[in-house]
Amino acid sequence: MQLFYAPDLDPASGSYLLGEEESKHAVRVLRLGRGDSLWVTDGRGAMCRAEIADDSPRGCRLEILGCEQGFGQRPYSLHLAVAPTKNVDRYEWFAEKATEIGVDRITPVLTDRCERRTLRIDRILRVVTGAMKQSLKAYLPRVDSPMPLRELLELPCAGSRLIAHCEESGSRTPLGEAFGPREQVLILIGPEGDFSSDEIRSALDSGFRAVSLGRSRLRTETAGVVAAHSVAFVNGW
């Protein structure tokens, strides 16, 4: 099954012109031609079966044969707010793996101990788009621009708001016990140096609950992947 991204897809139109990048991949890399079948998604839940009507690498014309709305929709919602890593490749790795597992929104959160304060959001979007297609998903995660922690603490969340930190003082609930199935979950994960004590206190004062990701000390990007998997596991996904 070959899946392509069609952000402006209108399933009711009956046809679609793939962008040049996707067209080149289909025709020159995968050697697909007229009459070959493939799948396209709009990243908003539509999964459509299509056939190549014109195999130009500049613009591959598809005939839409059928669509399923809400394809693979998860029973839960996950927002991961993860501090940028010093090595940007590690953050892109986290975004890729979280997308493969299942995440709805990724926010790079800026904290006191962040060693990196800027990110190429366009690069991260390319990574998560590729991960969506590779894992045959029909939902593209939202990727925010870097956001200061104080702003993120004010974001609404109808479900569980959690902060994972490494401080030994104070109680921390194991992540898998801090929320239930089919919930909306927001999880905060800090930088390599962890959140400061003041930041943890601010989060708790804002209604966040402190959680633990286990006994091992994890890298920031690993913690993000563990969090995504833990939420998927609780939901049996």
Image (cartoon, rainbow, N blue to C red):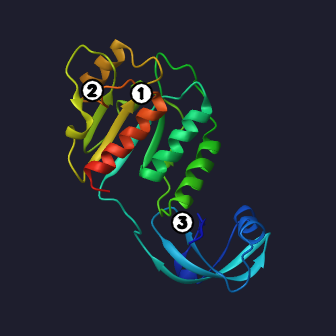
Q: What residue is pinned by disc 3?
A: 42
Residues at marks 2 and 1, CA–CA distance in whole angstroms = 25 Å
Q: Depth-wise, is mark 1 or mark 3 nearer the camera?
A: 1
The reply to whether discs 2 and 3 touch (Cβ–Cβ < 8 Å) is no
**Residue 130: quadrant of the picture:** bottom right
- Residue 203 position in % (x across, y down): 30, 24
For this rendering, which residue is in front, 24 or 8? 24
Q: Secondary structure at mark 1?
A: loop
Q: Quadrant of the C terminus?
A: bottom left
For the question of whether residue 155 can be seen, the reply is no
User: Height in image: 78 above or below 187?
Assistant: below
Label ID, residue 206: 2
Nearest the viewer among 186 and 98 is 98
Q: For mark 1, what is the residue?
A: 218
Residue 196 spot, x, y in % from top left: 38, 14
Instruction: Name the residue rendered at 61%, 32% in the picture.
Output: 88
Mark 3: amino acid: Asp
Does residue 36 appear to the left or right of 86 in the view shown? right
Q: Quadrant of residue 151?
A: top left
Looking at the rendered structure, the kind of residue marked 1 is: Leu
Marks 2 and 1, the one that precedes in the sequence: 2
Q: Secondary structure at mark 2?
A: loop
